[in-house]
Image (spheres, rainbow, N blue to C red):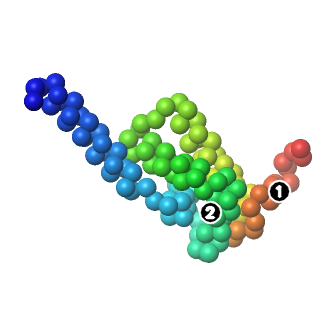
């Protein structure tokens, strides 16, 4: 084996090991999305059943395969900074969807005003916005 083949093989092996390590850590949406929400929104508490209902409604609405793809792409982007402009835009889109759907599907804003660490309840998916100052479409 010459030096060039050895370097190509070792770089491929290291890259595959890094990617495989990232891929094996991919959690299901029920475990990953709540931690991602806490990272973006801050601390809150929510019953496990209601959290599961929200993730189920989110997955049903957008499609489980797209949500699992989002989780995988997000983990890869966070762990290795790999991706293309297309995948980065899709990850950003689903991050915004996740946060906005969480705000409109829970009573987070009402509880956040009165509690330091709000106990949030799931009120239903794709409910109208509770903000009285929001413009009507």
- Whole-percent x, y for residue 104 in the image: 74, 57
Q: Is residue 35 visible?
A: no
Task: Give the residue drawn at x 43%, y 45%.
Answer: 76
Question: Of all residues shown, which one is farthest toward the front?
Answer: 1
Which disc number belongs to residue 128? 1
Q: Secondary structure at mark 2?
A: helix
Question: Of all residues shown, which one is farthest toward the right?
Answer: 136
Quickly name the residue at label 2.
55
Task: Give the residue drawn at x 41%, y 38%.
Answer: 81
Taking 4 as reference, is 52 left or right?
Answer: right
Q: Is residue 2 above or below residue 29?
A: above
Tag 1 or tag 2, which sits nearer the N-term?
2
| Quarter of the rendering containing residue 34 | bottom right
Identify which residue, 35 or 75, lies in the foreground: 75
Taking 120 as reference, is 34 left or right?
Answer: left
Question: Which quadrant of the figure contains the C terminus?
Answer: top right
Task: Give the residue drawn at x 45%, y 42%.
Answer: 77
- Whole-percent x, y for residue 49 in the image: 62, 75
- Whole-percent x, y for residue 36 in the image: 53, 55
Q: Secondary structure at mark 1?
A: loop
Task: Give the residue drawn at x 55%, y 32%.
Answer: 86
Label 1: how many Cα within 10 Å (few below 14, some 14–19, many 20+): few
Tag in front: 2 or 1 = 2
Label 2: how many Cα within 10 Å (few below 14, some 14–19, many 20+): many
Q: Is residue 94 visible?
A: yes
């Amino acid at each position: 084996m010459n030096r060039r083949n050895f370097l190509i093989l070792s770089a491929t092996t290291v890259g595959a090991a890094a990617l495989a390590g990232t891929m094996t850590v991919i959690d299901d949406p029920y475990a990953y999305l709540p931690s991602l929400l806490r990272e973006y929104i801050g601390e809150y508490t929510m019953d496990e059943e209601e959290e599961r209902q929200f993730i189920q409604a989110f997955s049903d609405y957008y499609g489980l395969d797209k949500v699992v793809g989002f989780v995988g792409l997000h983990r890869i982007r966070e762990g290795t900074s790999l991706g293309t402009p297309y995948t980065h835009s899709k990850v950003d889109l689903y991050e915004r969807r996740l946060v906005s759907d969480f705000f409109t599907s829970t009573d987070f804003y009402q509880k956040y005003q009165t509690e330091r660490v709000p106990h949030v309840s799931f009120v239903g998916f794709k409910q109208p916005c509770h903000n009285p100052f929001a413009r009507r479409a």
